[in-house]
Amino acid sequence: MGLLLLDPRWGRCYESYSEDPKIVQAMTELIPGLQGDIPAGSPKGVPYVAGKTKVAACAKHFVGDGGTINGVNENNTIIDRHGLLAIHMPAYYNSIIKGVSTVMVSYSSWNGIKMHANQELVTGFLKNTLQFRGFVITDWEGLDRITSPPHANYSYSVEVGIKAGIDMVMVPYNYIEFIDDLTFQVKNNIIPMSRIDDAVRRILRVKFVMGLFENPLADDSLVDQLGSQEHRELAREAVRKSLVLLKNGDSTEVPLLPLPKKTSKILPLPKKTSKILVAGSHADNLGYQCGGWTIEWQGLSGNDLTRGTTILNAIKNTVDQQTEVVYQENPDANFVKSNNFSYAIVVVGEHPYAETNGDSMNLNIADPGPNTITNVCGAVECVVVVISGRPVVIQPYLSYIDALVAAWLPGTEGQGVADVLFGDYDFTGKLPRTWFKTVDQLPMNVGDPHYDPLFPFGFGLTTKSRQTSY
């Protein structure tokens, strides 16, 4: 379950951890940040938005979206009712308690029934049992996806979707067809007027709560905060805290990270070493750092997407001005061996993706990443930083790697990665899911009888910043 554009689709990886109340709490804490803190004593399920500087939140994708077979997008989640409620539903309980305004339905199915057509769960459970009083919205062309192929019988899709309890329909293109079909079905008592009244009542409730009738236009008083330095510093802090250190030398007695730091008795001085190598397709690529679902739906490659700091530039900003930083995307082993580097930082990972384009049955690091790791790390002491939206295949290269960092998608603030690599801040992050050895193990979850991960759920080494005098 996610909020706004937070999406649980993990390709072939899947782990059921939503039963943990601490994780559920963290996942839904975004709601009061977006909408404001719900007043004490507010009735359960009633949406709340605290004024024109707040926005309505959307809990999505209802429900079981993260548990599909092999993690394939828009696929079928096979699980009994108890499992669905215990694993996939808790974040929705919490969202409704926090006054979430809208819920978006998933493209996926539960035991073969499309969620967009599931009256039992949308009306019976979400609206009646959980007492959700906001409105339910489809995903993009969600009604079309009820049939296979999509839009094969649109009038049928309109009927079963609206009867299931959907209140607002996302129709990006042919809205006239939808209006005509819905109007015909209401006039001919195929869809009861009571269902339309319920939808209108819910939509108006959210609009009244938001104050849209008093203030129909967006409030631009906060526009100067978009991309502000304060927000970038907060994003940089999030990067630092989300990094997970998976390996740090061959023993705890001889760690590689944090990288050496020159200091004085008065104040910290820049980090210093004579010559370092930075390599990898993701070291100087802001688009790769940001991933999909950013300014562009599927994301982009390159540094023209938005303003930010690549990891390469972050390293250059961090080391001493006298340190020579050499960047080659995919150097050969002879080049590495012949240049007397103090160490190397290799940044590799996945190319950007969103939704179905992220479905993967191999979860490999993008080429030439594996070749870069073996060429560089086989010739010089190295740190490998993995940029990815999920665990990827790393075991075949682990013996070459001296230190390994999961950086996920750090977005625009690559400086946060350098902050921790060089010891200005400590590694504290823990894995939010199991890191597998091979994809043949998947799905693999905590508690499985043959649980044998490369790195277990919750794993993460820590560091203590060290002060090295010269």
Image (cartoon, helix red, strand yellow):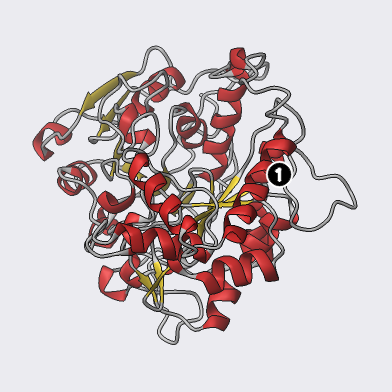
Q: Is residue 368 visible?
A: yes
Residue at 43 percent across and 33 percent down: it is 411
Q: Which residue shows up at 75% across the image and 43% down it? A: 48
Q: Is residue 411 left or right of residue 458?
A: left
Residue drawn at (40%, 79%) of the image: 111
Farthest residue toward the front?
Answer: 188
Q: Note whether 356 is above or below 304 in the view shown.
A: below
* Numbered disc 1: secondary structure: helix
Question: Can residue 248 be seen in the rendering of this structure?
Answer: no
Residue type at numbered disc 1: Arg
What residue is rendered at 67% in x and 42% in y?
204
| Residue behind mark 1 | 205
Q: Residue 316, percent across and down?
A: 38, 19
- Would you identify the image quadrant in which residue 394 lies? bottom left
Decide which of 47, 440 is in the foreground and name it: 47
**Camera-nearest residue between 422 and 139:** 139
Near-viewer residue (336 or 452): 452
Does residue 191 sit above or below 235 in this rendering?
below
